[in-house]
Image (cartoon, grey):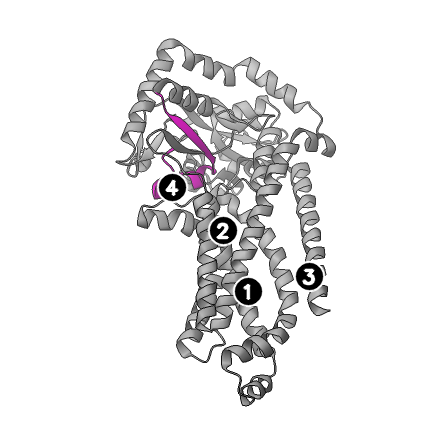
């Protein structure tokens, strides 16, 4: 039995090690990992070819070209990008981040590259025209942004409540659906959105004027910060900077965006326009699901078997592991592994590997629980009869108990496979471009939230249906 447990351990960690080894390695001397929020036009967004473009993207790429380094862009979302920078998972952040004294305590900023204020937007038919009209109402903001900071700083004065979202699309939709009466965001972003068909109107002048800067973790990547500053100065001197700003804020930019918004917005049209991005998201989701199922099954069976061994320490270990990882919310576990551990150890964990570890521990804990339950559901007389015939515990478990227990566990295994597939959507929080994150990026460009999420939902249902049919086929084969 001990030998088999060692084999389980070896296979489990070898599987994780294989995927960690296959993850792309970034050479810090020439390539820097840059976090951003790709739902923040005109600074960062995905174009019709699903390439990340905008003021921030063109600036960082142009500066990299001028200074002779490369960038690896990670679409993490604003709040997650800042957390990842603080934990050392990425080297820098460029995402329309306002330079503030509070942020300067943990981050080092570049020379400012843009100036913008905070404005309030409301629905087109709203009668609210100023901050006084917000009394007793609810406003929407985006997590970690200067707009959120500004709204929270004046909410007591004007008597309104604040609701927070992680994505700009959800902020704007909350106003358009009437759940919130207004939203606060950067003037450049909201003015660009209004001109390109956002469906809101700006009713206040810019307040809390601030400057945008490129950020690195305080005291680290000073070479990168210096190169950014020097590259920015060169772009301003040779006129490239002004060209970039005009390209994404001038009339040509908004008219081009309006033309894109007038394209076919039917379900089939959206599928055709985004088929490659959606396909990539599906493949990433399937890959995450398959690898996680394999690792979680191995981990779960191992921990489940520990829970039925005639040893108090083994049982206690199994119970503790199941209690911890089944009790932790999946989102918290993902952020702890991706951001928490690196901040403690100083070692980067690739997003894909962090995602696999997260799902393995969470799903494996549930698997362990029903593996233990399935074995314990077998009549205890079966083990006693086997041992009375002279079979050792390990052989009795393998030959008598497990074959009966597996039949009891099969329905739970099938259910866990489906749960694992759905839980991959949580990993969008650490920037993995699975199906859910892909949907967010598409919506940031075309603002077709209902239709895009409907498409994503149907795709998930189709995959789950196929997985269920496959699992049922396996179940029938085992029971035959």
Relative to 6, 398 lies left or right = right
Closer-to-camera residue (32/214): 32
Quadrant of the rendered structure where residue 26 is? top left
Q: CA distance from mark 1 to mark 3?
A: 17 Å
The answer, for residue 179, to whether it is visible in the render is no
Residue 184's spot in the image, x, y percent?
A: 49, 33
Question: Of tags 3 and 4, which is closer to the observer?
Answer: 3
Magenta stretch, residue numbers? 68-92
- The mark found on residue 474 in the picture is 3
Q: Determine the residue positioned at 56% across, 56% down.
A: 293
Q: CA distance from mark 3 to mark 4?
A: 40 Å
Question: Of tags 3 and 2, which is closer to the observer?
Answer: 3
Q: Determine the residue positioned at 30% across, 33% down.
A: 221
- The mark found on residue 89 in the picture is 4
Q: CA distance from mark 3 to mark 2?
A: 24 Å
Query: Which residue is under mark 1?
Result: 367
Q: CA distance from mark 4 to mark 1?
A: 30 Å
Q: Quadrant of the C terminus?
A: bottom right
Residue 451's spot in the image, x, y percent?
A: 68, 37
Residue at disc 4, secondary structure: loop
Question: Of tags 1 and 3, which is closer to the observer?
Answer: 3
Closer-to-camera residue (211/237): 237
Are the residues flagged by discs 3 and 4 in contact, CB closer than 8 Å?
Answer: no
Residue at disc 3, secondary structure: helix
- Looking at marks 4 and 2 on the same chain, the residue that comes earlier in the sequence is marked by 4
Q: Is residue 70 magenta?
A: yes
Query: Which residue is under mark 2?
Result: 356
């Amino acid at each position: 039995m001990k030998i088999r447990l060692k084999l389980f351990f070896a296979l489990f960690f070898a599987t994780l090690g294989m995927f960690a080894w296959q993850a792309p390695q970034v050479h810090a001397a020439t390539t820097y990992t840059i976090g951003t929020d790709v739902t923040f036009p005109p600074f960062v967004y995905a174009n019709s070819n699903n390439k990340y473009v905008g003021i921030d993207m063109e600036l960082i790429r142009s500066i990299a070209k001028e200074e002779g380094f490369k960038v690896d862009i990670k679409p993490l979302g604003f709040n997650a990008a800042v957390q990842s920078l603080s934990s050392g998972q990425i080297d820098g952040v460029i995402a329309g981040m306002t330079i503030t004294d509070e942020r300067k305590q943990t981050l080092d900023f570049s020379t400012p590259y843009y100036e913008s204020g905070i404005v309030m937007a409301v629905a087109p038919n709203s009668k609210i025209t100023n901050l006084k009209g917000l009394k007793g109402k609810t406003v929407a903001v985006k997590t970690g942004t200067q707009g959120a900071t500004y709204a929270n700083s004046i909410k007591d004065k004007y008597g309104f409540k604040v609701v927070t979202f992680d994505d700009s699309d959800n902020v704007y939709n909350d106003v358009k659906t009437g759940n919130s009466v207004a939203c606060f965001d950067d003037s450049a972003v909201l003015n660009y959105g209004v001109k390109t068909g956002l469906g809101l109107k700006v009713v206040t002048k810019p307040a809390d004027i601030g400057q945008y800067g490129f950020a690195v973790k305080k005291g680290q990547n000073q070479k990168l910060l210096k190169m950014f500053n020097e590259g920015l100065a060169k772009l301003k001197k040779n006129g490239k900077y002004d060209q970039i700003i005009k390209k994404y804020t001038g009339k040509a930019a908004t008219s081009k965006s309006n033309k894109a918004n007038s394209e076919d917005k039917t379900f089939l049209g959206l599928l055709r326009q985004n088929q490659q991005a959606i396909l990539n998201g599906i493949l990433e989701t399937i890959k995450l699901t398959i690898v996680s199922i394999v690792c979680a099954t191995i981990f779960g069976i191992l921990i489940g078997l520990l829970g039925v061994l005639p040893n108090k320490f083994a049982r206690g270990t199994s119970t503790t592991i199941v209690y911890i990882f089944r009790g932790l919310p999946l989102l918290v576990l993902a952020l702890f592994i991706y951001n928490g551990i690196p901040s403690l150890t100083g070692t980067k964990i690739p997003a894909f590997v962090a995602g696999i570890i997260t799902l393995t521990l969470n799903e494996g804990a549930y698997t362990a629980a029903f593996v233990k339950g399935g074995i314990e559901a077998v009549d205890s007389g079966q083990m006693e009869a086997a041992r009375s015939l002279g079979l050792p515990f390990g052989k009795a478990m393998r030959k008598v108990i497990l074959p009966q227990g597996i039949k009891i566990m099969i329905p739970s295994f099938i259910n866990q496979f489906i749960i694992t597939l759905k839980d991959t959507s949580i990993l969008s929080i650490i920037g993995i471009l699975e199906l859910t994150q892909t949907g967010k990026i598409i919506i940031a460009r075309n603002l077709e939230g209902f239709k895009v999420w409907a498409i994503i939902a149907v795709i998930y249902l189709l995959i789950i249906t196929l997985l269920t049919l496959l699992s049922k086929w396996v179940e029938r084969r085992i029971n035959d």
